[in-house]
Every structure is written in structure tokens, then in C-alpha cells.
Amino acid sequence: MNFLPFPQASWSKSALIIIAGILTFSFFNHAVWNKKVIAEDIIEYYGYLPAAFIYDDVGMSFTGGNYYYGDKFWGLPGDSLFRYQKFTMGLAFAYAPFFLIAHAYCHFTGIPATGFTPPYPLLLLVSTLVFGFMGLIYFRKLLLRFFGEWASAFTLIAIFLGTNLFSYITHLAPLSHAYLFCLVAAFLHYTFRFFEKPGPLTASLAGLSCGWLVLIRPADAPVAMLPLLLFFSRPGTPREKFAFMKKQFPAILLFSTSVLIVFLPQFIYWKHTSGSWLVYGYGDEGFHFSNPHIVEGLFSFRNGWLIYTPMMFPALAGLPFLFHRHRELTIPFLLILLACSTIILSWWCWWYGGSFGNRAFVDLYPILGLGFAALFHGLQKSGLAKQIPVIILVSFFIFLNQFQAMQYRRNVLTQDSMTAKSYAAIFLKGEKPENLSQLIELPDYEAAKKRRAENN
């Protein structure tokens, strides 16, 4: 199936080059420049850095105990006048090199080095671009480990252009999901590499990426179970498995130590600011495990995952193909997907506030992408009669995703208030209908919190 104008050996590299060009174009042409970057959730992810490097006070006592401080710092009450950030510091680690570049630039050029002047938000956007592209590089490595060039290249293009990953690398930067996509892909890559060729460097990198992704988003903790699940699913007798574990005990210890190293600054920070080693910063926000919103979270017009990311239908359909080709991978992956999906869809705000589709699933695309690749790998052995309809369908999903992303940027597709009627009214339309405000349904956030508290 060589209908592309370059050698088969370079298909996936060429896909990355195309993606790099699209990312560069999107970075300079989409509406990221017209929004306030350090706002909403980003305030609480980012606040660690100016508090530590500029105000020299991670406890934010300079706020005088106030929750709002010039709309630049938000902090929950800790010990005395100390405040602490609601979110963990994992994303601040990702921002840090870019923050320091912006900080040095301000000092050299005489721009006020406040942490909030233009170079700082600009470099935050650059950080998303870098991590997003690194994630796609790791994703390519992961795909080529199990599939050929054609399936890998096709999957890279489809997942990047056809899902909300595109939006979270470009105009919805610098939220956490592009970074988590990168770290999950890296963690999977280094984990598989460790099982193939164990060594201290691979164990350390797997541990660091594992700890980092969980520190950014603790709800992704089931992904960290992959090494253990692969260990139990690998072929061999219990005696052989025990011998492997005994032989690799130093590397396993190094993996665990690397995870702890990532978490250690967070534990010290919590102890310093709140007096406790472990803190839950979400207050009355929590999970609704007794009544997860499975149907709404997947199919609701209010940010339902599969409504706004239909490209994942082929990915889910490909899981049986993955099972047939790589059975030892599929059961661990299914367990992780089931656990993560239950956590995602049990969150009190199951539509995840202002977002384009259910953004929490973006973190899992390196896993789901393997199902997508398995489906298209199987198509290579089928005739054009089966290949062409699927390629047309995937092309339509790419077009739909890009069109709806444009609608989101223009606020035609609303962040959290869509209904079946409003979706029908804006479908494939570039401008708002005059009666759109009558067709949407604003969510009641306080009522959702209350229902969660009553049912728990």
C-alpha cells in the first residue's frame, strides 16, 4: 500500500515533519495570543514559580492570608499566614525551564521581572508546544515498537489532527493535558524498553516519568500500574518470574527511588505550608464513585468525550485487533483504561468545566492510539474495498475535529453548555445562530457538588 510519494521507511518521520509544520503555523496563527494565559487553573499550576524565585516565599505569606492576590496568586489556608496551592507542583516542574529563560531575558533586557510580564506567558505557551511535540516523538517510538511505518504514520496524523489533543497543544495551552500525553507516552516507552533490556538508566527514566505524570494528575495513578501488570502478564512460570524480579531488584529499587524523588519536593512543600505531609487541596470537590456518569461523560453534548472526539471510535474498535496481535499488552491496557475511565467519569464535574470535549481522556491517547494502529495495521492485508471507506471516515473525523476546534475558538461551540439542539444548530456553521443563547443550558456547578456530597 505505497501510495505516498516517499519511501516507506520514512513515513512516520515524514508524518512528524508535517505535524511540526502544522504546529508552528497553529502556534503563530491561532487565538492563543488573544487570551490571558496565566488565568484560571494556570494560576494555581504556575504560582509555585514566581512565589519561589521572585517573592522568595513558597508559603505566599506576602498575600497577607488573602485568597486573591492581584489575580496572580490563589492559595488555600495553611499554617499561620501561609497559603498553599490547590494543585500539585508537577506542572510547575514542566514550566520551570521556560520560566527561567523568560526570567533571564527580562533581567538582560530591563523588562520588569515580575513573573507576569509578556515574556513569561509567551514561554509558557512555548513549553506546551515543546512537550506536545516531544509527546508525539515518544508516541512514534511506541507505535514503531509494535507496528510498521504505514500504520504508525497514519495513527500519528489521525490522533494529532483528529482529536482534541490538537487543541490542548495549541489554542488551549498551557493546561496539563499535552504534558501528560508526553509523560504517559514516555513512561510506556521506557517501561517496554526496560522489559526488553533492563538497565539502571531505563529504570530511572521510567520511574521519573511515572512519578512526574502522577504528580501532575494523581487521578492518572492507574497508569503507574503498567510495569506490575506487564510483569504478571509476561510469559513464564512463577519461578521464572520470581527469578527475573530477584535479578532486577536493584533496578526496581532505582525505579521506586526515582518516583519518590519526584514527589519529595511536594511532600516538603505541604509540610512547610500546611503542617501536614499529605494534603487534599480540592476541598468539597471530589469523586462520585457510587454513581459515575458513564453515559453522560461519553455521549453528552456537554463535552461528552466521544461526541467531540469521534476519532476514538476506531481506536476502541481496534482493541480486539490489538488483543489478537499483542495479547500480553491488551489486558494490562484494558485494566488501566477501565480504572482511569471510572475515575474520570466519577468526578463531580463530569464535563470538566470549560473544555473542548472531555479533556481528561487526552492523557490516555498513547494507550488508545495503539488500538487505532492495530486496526489500521490489519487493514494493510485487506483490499481497497475495506481500506477506502475507513480512510474516508477518518478524513471526515479530522475535518470535523478541526472545524469544531475553530468553532470553539470563536465561541460558537460553548465551553460547558451545549445541548443536542444547540449542537444541531451550529453543526458545520462558522457563526453563532441568533437564538443560540436559547438553545444552550448552563450547568449548575453548586448543585453538582451538592449531589456528590449527598450521594457520598
Image (tube, rainbow, N blue to C red):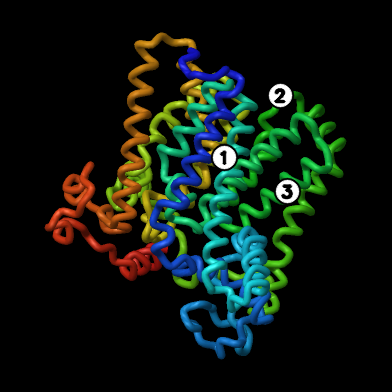
Q: Nearer the viewer, residue 420 or 376?
A: 376
The residue at which mark 1 appears reads as 136
Q: Which of marks 2 and 1 is in front?
A: 1
Q: Mark 2 points at which residue?
A: 235
Q: In the displayed image of the protein, which residue is found farthest to the front?
A: 109
Element at label 1: helix
| Nearer-N-terminus badge (3/2) | 3
Q: x, y (%) of residue 62?
A: 60, 87
CA gap, disc 2 to disc 1?
Answer: 30 Å
Circle 3 residues within 10 Å: few <14, some 14–19, many ≥20: many
What's the distance in space between the residues labelled 3 and 1, CA to CA? 20 Å
**What secondary structure is found at the residue carrying circle 2?**
loop
Dividing the picture into quadrants, the one containing residue 11 is top right
Q: Mark 3 points at which residue?
A: 207
> Which is more toward the observer, 268 or 205?
205
Q: Where is residue 454 in the image (x, y as percent from the top left)?
A: 37, 67
